[in-house]
């Protein structure tokens, strides 16, 4: 199991903030949201066959298979924070992200289409957006 370094509540809160205003999300929101979801991914898909990188925020090793210990891993997936959060929450599909060049994936097991989105982050985002919409409607 991957070690949790991000407080889960802080991660969920950051993810909810990102969900309602992704275009305005700065480092204070992106860093805990990305770290939280990467840790969840590694927890849900334990292993060391793939290194998943979302610079400058974090990287994790996940997915069962051959584990590397030195140098460049045999499989690497790298993307930016906005793309990662969109993938993990279901706002963006793997195929579209790859076709748009928003994700770089190389090596065996680096195709994550069957592993994304994650149910927890998807639920967090859906709930945050519903509450945000309800609040906006009440204010009108």
Image (cartoon, rainbow, N blue to C red):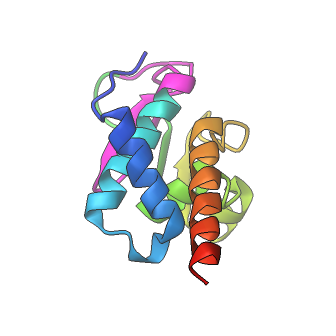
Residue 133 drawn in magenta? no
Determine whether 102 is above or below 1 in the image: below
Residue at image coords 38%, 43%: 11
Would residue 109 appear left or right of 69 to someone viewing this image? right
Q: Is residue 78 above or below residue 22?
A: above
Query: In front here: 23 or 54?
Result: 23
Residue 71: x percent and y percent?
Answer: 29, 33
Q: Residue furthest bottom?
A: 140
Quadrant in the picture for residue 94: bottom right
Residue name at image x 42 percent, y 30 percent: 61
Left or right of residue 22, residue 90 in this image: right
Closest to the observer, 36 or 130:
130
Q: Which residues are magenta?
A: 43-68
Residue 79 appears in the figure: no
The C terminus: image quadrant:
bottom right
Residue 22 coordinates in the image, percent (x, y): 48, 70
Please tell me how many numbered marks the rendered image carries. 0
Q: Residue furthest top?
A: 1
The reply to whether residue 76 is in sight is yes
Q: Residue 111, image x and y in percent?
A: 65, 43
Q: Picture coordinates of residue 126 (x, y %)? A: 65, 53
Q: For the N terminus, give its image quadrant.
A: top left
Is residue 45 covered in magenta? yes
Image quadrant in which you'd find residue 59:
top left
Residue drawn at (61%, 61%) of the image? 129
**Residue 57 drawn above or below residue 22:** above
Q: Nearer the viewer, residue 135 or 63?
A: 135
Q: Is residue 110 left or right of residue 6?
A: right
On screen, residue 102 versus residue 13, left or right, reads: right
């Amino acid at each position: 199991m991957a070690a949790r370094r991000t407080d889960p509540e802080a991660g969920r809160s950051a993810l909810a903030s990102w969900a309602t205003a992704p275009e305005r999300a700065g480092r204070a929101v992106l860093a805990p949201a990305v770290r939280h979801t990467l840790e969840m991914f590694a927890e849900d898909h334990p292993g060391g066959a793939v290194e998943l990188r979302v610079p400058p925020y974090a990287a994790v090793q996940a997915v069962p298979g051959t584990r590397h210990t030195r140098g460049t891993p045999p499989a690497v997936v790298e993307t930016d924070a906005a793309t990662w959060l969109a993938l993990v929450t279901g706002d963006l599909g793997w195929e579209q992200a790859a076709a748009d060049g928003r994700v770089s994936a190389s090596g065996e097991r680096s195709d994550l289409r069957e592993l994304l989105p994650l149910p927890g982050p998807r639920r967090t985002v859906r709930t945050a957006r519903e509450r945000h919409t309800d609040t906006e409607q009440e204010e009108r």
